[in-house]
Image (cartoon, rainbow, N blue to C red):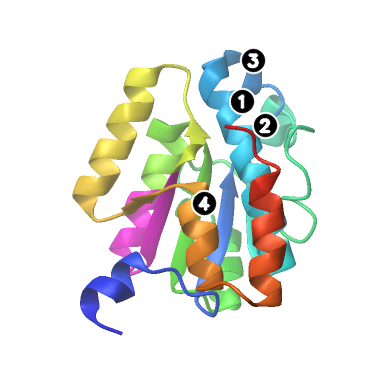
Amino acid sequence: MGEIKDKFWLDGEKAVLVVIDVQEKLTPAMNQELYKQLVLHTNLLTSGFKALNLPIIATEQYPKGLGHTSADIVGATDKCCIEKTAFSCCGEETFVAALEKTGAKQVVIVGMESHVCVFQTVIDLLDKGYQVHLVKDAISSRFKSDYENAISNAAQAGAVITTTEMALFQLVKGAGTDSFKVISKLVRQRTP
């Protein structure tokens, strides 16, 4: 692959989904428009990654105080859920080890809050040489200004800003395969 395509094109053999801190005690404080969008798209991505048999890592920031992953998020914590206290996921050795174990070089990021744990994780992953795809319709903050600033700064730092459908259809590459049929069916369930 060329340098541009290598950066912008997700490859199922290199990708992992990371769901950051979508926790029950944080969700009421979120901008509810952004949160509803996050739930819909995180669930689509989680279902898609599972259907394609791709790895998923979830994190929970200090669950003793903030609770566990919201019941709105289906299946993200089934295989790998890591507790952390550092804002950046990379500040938790267990996360770094779990990420390395997947062998992934491309990290698809969703979660909250966009400008704190999500953004700091994006920066640390870029600094470690990972290709980061930040899914802008699957992240949330309390305030839209923080959400927008996180996206802008992540892009300036080198993250690829993407959407749920862009990510899923890049992973299947084309029509006519079983993978495409599964992803297409999931996406059709999404209401505009």
Q: Counting other residues with Cα less than 10 Å from the Cα at mark 1, is it few (<14), some (14-19), or many (20 or more)?
A: some
What is the secondary structure assignment of the residue under circle 4?
helix
The amino acid type, in three-letter code, at marker 2 is Gln
Q: Residue at x 64, y 49 (%)?
A: 187
The amino acid type, in three-letter code, at marker 1 is Lys
Say whether marks 4 and 1 touch (CB < 8 Å).
Answer: no
Residue pointed to by mark 1: 36
What percent of the width, then of the height, locates residue 60? Answer: 65, 41
Q: Earlier in the sequence, mark 2 or mark 4?
A: 2
What percent of the width, then of the height, locates residue 88? Answer: 45, 46
- Residue 168, located in which quarter of the rendered image? bottom right
Q: Earlier in the sequence, mark 3 or mark 2?
A: 2
The amino acid type, in three-letter code, at marker 3 is Pro
Q: Mark 3 to mark 2: distance in Å? A: 10 Å
Say whether marks 2 and 4 touch (CB < 8 Å).
Answer: no
Which is nearer the eye, 150 or 81? 150
What is the secondary structure assignment of the residue under circle 1?
helix
Q: Earlier in the sequence, mark 1 or mark 2?
A: 2
- The part of the chain drawn in magenta is 122-135
Q: How many marks?
A: 4
The amino acid type, in three-letter code, at marker 4 is Glu
Q: Counting other residues with Cα less than 10 Å from the Cα at mark 3, is it few (<14), some (14-19), or many (20 or more)?
A: few
Instruction: State left or right for residue 17 relative to residue 147.
Output: right
Is residue 124 depicted above or below 182 in this figure?
above
Judge whether residue 73 is colored magenta: no
Residue pointed to by mark 2: 23
Residue pointed to by mark 4: 165
- The reply to whether residue 177 is visible in this rendering is yes
What is the secondary structure assignment of the residue under circle 3?
helix
Residue pointed to by mark 3: 28
